[in-house]
Image (cartoon, rainbow, N blue to C red):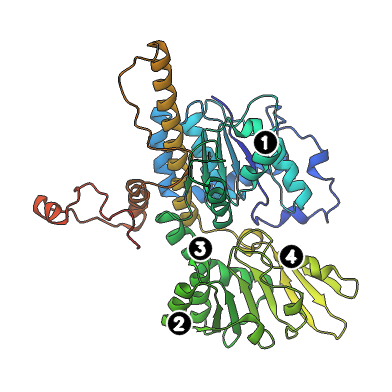
């Protein structure tokens, strides 16, 4: 079995010990470390903190019942045997549990090449991804991506390796958009995708449980952890009313903040109105807001013209994706003074004395400033694992069929069910239901069973799926 390699743009906040050395440690890129067994194919900040990391992982496992159940099931049949998975996600204790679940399903040994550390800059980030793509020991045949960075990098910089992929699993809006761009084409033109891809972002479980519920709790924890701000009575603007924006808006509203929403999509805007929020343009309200939260998945949502008109003390943060939503580059102007207040809090001081409070330098605060709820990560991790298994088993079935055809001289009569082509697909509804069922025991929930007559009346199987593929939950 091959080793899954892990690249990441950021690791989550832990004990805060990452910064005890005051930033004096050399860049992990330039330092070769070894674990207790002499393994050195990794780059992290402090390998000597592995025992603390193990305790964090064990703590997370207690809340990740679904993943742990899936791990036990996968250990027996090893559905990912032979898979070589390049994983490009944020690293924290919860995603580490997921990575070890992939190991239980696919590997015979526990050495994991991992390239990730807290505080990576952009150059470090791309270097980490390159270490996972271009290696002497193995070549990835599956990608699990969050943002499309690994997929995009491999397609442009390593096209020969890209063409060897057997499957791509993507969980973010920008990454999925990139995948659809690669397969959108004129009739008859070939897809730029080398293999099928699964879009988790628009499947059922991931966006409705991970994205919404994590955002709902994460925005409050993030603001409190970084600024100790009193939320009641504050005028908060939520840019974007998708699942993340809905969670943030409703959480702040429950804390008695005055919430206003910006939107480009009329359907999402109407939802915001029906939920009791005003929908306005950012330019029209920028002078009055106390808290600005971006949740769009887009770029340059907050620009220089907004910074120049913000009131002093306005808190600006990103819950959307990566560091593209807030144009931080415009704040590098020599006329502005950066004052580091806390590890993830900067005051940007303007010539007129105004101070803007910028969190995590515009990066995701739920990744940079707080820990993630373990049960939510468990839901997402299960969908990721099942999507990888689905594409891997399909590729093996297709490979075996091609071998039989070749061995028979092209006369092999059995037709292959080519259910996945070089296109983008949603996770099968049955798998979404299975992920949900894995987590019900955590809450002591018991499902009602349909009678035979009820199942016939609804036209569904008693075992599911219970809703049509296009049903909106």
Q: Does residue 63 appear in this view?
A: no
Q: Secondary structure at mark 4?
A: helix
175 on left or right of 394: right
Vertical order, 57 against 142 (above or below): below
Label 2 to label 3, Cα distance in Å?
22 Å
Q: Secondary structure at mark 2?
A: helix
Residue at image location 62% in from the left, 28% down from the top: 139
Label 4 to label 2, Cα distance in Å?
31 Å
Give neighbour class at mark 2: few <14, some 14-19, many 20+ (Cα, 10 Å).
some
Name the residue beneath numbered marker 1.
132
Q: Which mark is residue 273?
A: 2
Answer with mark 1 or mark 2, whichever residue precedes in sequence. 1
Q: Does residue 230 appear in this view?
A: yes
Answer with mark 1 or mark 3, whichever residue precedes in sequence. 1
Circles 1 and 2: CB atoms closer than 8 Å: no
Answer with mark 2 or mark 3, whichever residue precedes in sequence. 3
Label 1 to label 2, Cα distance in Å?
45 Å
Label 1 to label 4, Cα distance in Å?
26 Å
Q: Quadrant of the C terminus?
A: bottom left
Name the residue beneath numbered marker 4.
361
Vertical order, 151 against 467 (above or below): above
Name the residue beneath numbered marker 3.
214
Residue at image location 43% in from the left, 61% down from the top: 208
């Amino acid at each position: 079995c091959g080793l899954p390699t892990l690249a990441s743009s950021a690791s989550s906040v832990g004990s805060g010990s990452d910064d005890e050395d005051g930033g004096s440690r050399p860049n992990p890129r330039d330092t070769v470390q070894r674990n207790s067994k002499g393994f050195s194919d990794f780059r992290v900040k402090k390998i000597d903190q592995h025992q603390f990391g193990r305790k964090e992982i064990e703590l997370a496992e207690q809340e990740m019942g679904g993943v742990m159940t899936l791990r036990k099931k996968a250990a027996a049949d090893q559905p990912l045997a032979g898979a070589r998975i390049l994983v490009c996600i944020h690293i924290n204790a919860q995603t580490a549990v997921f990575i070890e679940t992939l190991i239980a399903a696919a590997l015979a040994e526990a050495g994991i090449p991992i390239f990730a550390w807290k505080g990576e800059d952009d150059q470090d980030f791309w270097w980490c991804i390159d270490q996972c793509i271009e290696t002497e020991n193995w070549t990835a045949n599956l990608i699990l991506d969050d943002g499309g960075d690994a997929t995009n990098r491999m397609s442009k910089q390593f096209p020969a390796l890209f063409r060897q992929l057997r499957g791509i699993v993507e969980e973010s809006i920008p990454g999925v958009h990139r995948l659809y761009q690669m397969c959108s084409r004129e009739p008859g033109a070939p897809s730029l995708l080398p293999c099928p891809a699964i879009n988790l972002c628009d499947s059922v479980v991931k966006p409705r449980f991970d994205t919404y519920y994590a955002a709902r709790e994460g925005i409050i924890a993030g603001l409190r952890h970084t600024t100790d701000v009193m939320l009641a009575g504050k005028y908060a603007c939520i840019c974007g009313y998708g699942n993340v924006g809905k969670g943030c808006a409703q959480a702040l509203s429950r804390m008695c903040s005055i919430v206003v929403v910006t939107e480009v999509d009329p359907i999402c805007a109407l939802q915001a109105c029906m939920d009791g929020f005003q929908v306005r343009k950012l330019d029209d309200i920028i002078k009055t807001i106390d808290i600005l939260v971006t949740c769009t998945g887009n770029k340059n949502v907050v620009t220089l013209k907004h910074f120049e008109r913000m009131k002093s003390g306005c808190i600006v943060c990103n819950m959307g994706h990566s560091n593209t939503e807030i144009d931080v580059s415009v704040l590098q102007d020599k006329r502005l003074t950066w004052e580091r207040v806390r590890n993830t809090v900067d005051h940007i001081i303007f010539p007129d004395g105004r101070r803007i409070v910028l969190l995590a330098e515009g990066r995701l605060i739920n990744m940079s400033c707080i820990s993630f709820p373990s049960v939510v990560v468990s839901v997402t991790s299960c969908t990721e694992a099942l999507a990888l298994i689905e594409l891997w088993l399909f590729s093996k079935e297709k490979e075996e069929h091609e071998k039989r055809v070749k061995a028979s001289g092209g006369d092999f009569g059995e037709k292959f069910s080519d259910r996945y082509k070089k296109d983008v697909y949603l996770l099968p509804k049955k798998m979404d239901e299975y992920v949900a069922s894995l987590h019900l025991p955590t809450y002591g929930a018991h499902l009602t069973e349909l009678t035979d007559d009820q199942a016939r009346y609804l036209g569904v199987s008693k075992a599911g799926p219970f809703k049509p593929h296009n049903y909106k939950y």
